[in-house]
Image: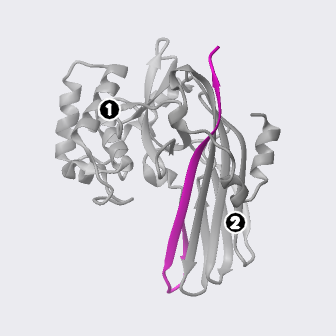
Amino acid sequence: MTPEDAASCLSMDSTEVAALALIDPGAVDWPRVTRTAFLVHQAFHYDYAGPIADLEHRLMLIPPAEHGDQRLVAHRLEVRCASAHTLSSDSDGFGNVVVEVRAPQVETTVGFEAWSIVERSNPATRPWLPAAALSDPRYLRPSALTLPDAALRGAARRHRESGLRGLDLALAVNGAVHETMRYDKNVSGVSTTASEAFAMGAGVCQDFAHVMLALCRMSGLPARYVSGHLLGEGGTHAWVEVLIPVEGDAAAEVHALDPTHGVAAGSRHITVAVGRDYDDVAPTSGSYRASVAGALTARRRVALMDVEYAV
């Protein structure tokens, strides 16, 4: 898919995009795939019981220009707000694309809709970071959502005493979290900590990632939270990137691991943002001034647009 084709696709409205002839992932011979192109469509709509003031909203919906073998081909973002508003875009300290929306007043509704076309190659090319990332405290120290309790510290001690190091240790932690945690979307929320999820032995992908981050960091493995998408799942997905030293500690190789599924993240994972934990990379967040509450409606779709196979 050329950038021109992608731009043409993103000029369509929602109905036209939904009508595109897309590829059934179940019909793909994945071991032979050399390149894929994905369409990611997300929509967030807020309804308020009355007027609100001083809306400040942050969106993290647009994937990075490049991330390993992943490349952003084209993107489009629309803000639907009847009131006057401003839109600005910048990158944060992790290199994520952050869009800020501000409106002095909103009558009753505001909506955000984003489309992205992303390509991935296979076999995957792992991202590399400067060696300084290996000692970056953001990836080694506990964050608010990954602060360990006695139970997590005990589990981390057992991993440290296993004799495994580097990538072998990261793979062991990934497998252990997958085996000991149960997926349950009814027991946790966005503010659930790693300690709380570990105590329950259950949660969603965010909780699996937070538990793995806590264990990795206490085991001396620098690691970061990843927010993104996984083809075939209905919501945003989360996994972990562990930084492993290479070439005599001259650089850090980034290994993406998915504890929810107990596997390495592959060509069907799409990275949107990285950070210390979920709070750094929430897709939509913000504040406003009013005495009324708001209700959020969200839609998301990840579709396979194009596939190339090895000859």
Q: Between marks 2 and 1, how big is the CA–CA gap?
A: 38 Å
**Residue 78, placed above or below residue 205:** below
Circle nearer the N terminus (2, 1):
2
Counting from the top left corner in percent of width and height, residue 184 is at 29, 53
Q: Which residue appears at 52% of the width and 26% of the height?
A: 30
Q: Tell me: 196 left or right of 10.
A: left
Kindly identify which residue carries mark 1: 174
Inspect the image, locate mark 2, and give the three-letter code of the amino acid beneath it.
Answer: Val
Disc 2 packing (10 Å; few <14; some 14–19; many ≥20): some
User: Does any portion of residue 268 appear in the rendered image?
Assistant: no
Residue at the image point whose x is 66% and y is 55% from the top: 114
Q: Is residue 286 above or below residue 260?
A: below
Q: What residue does disc 2 label?
A: 79
Q: Is residue 17 magenta?
A: no
Instruction: Give the image location of residue 166, x and y in percent.
Output: 35, 20
Main SS of the magenta part reads strand
Magenta segment range?
Answer: 285-311
Q: Quadrant of residue 134?
A: top left
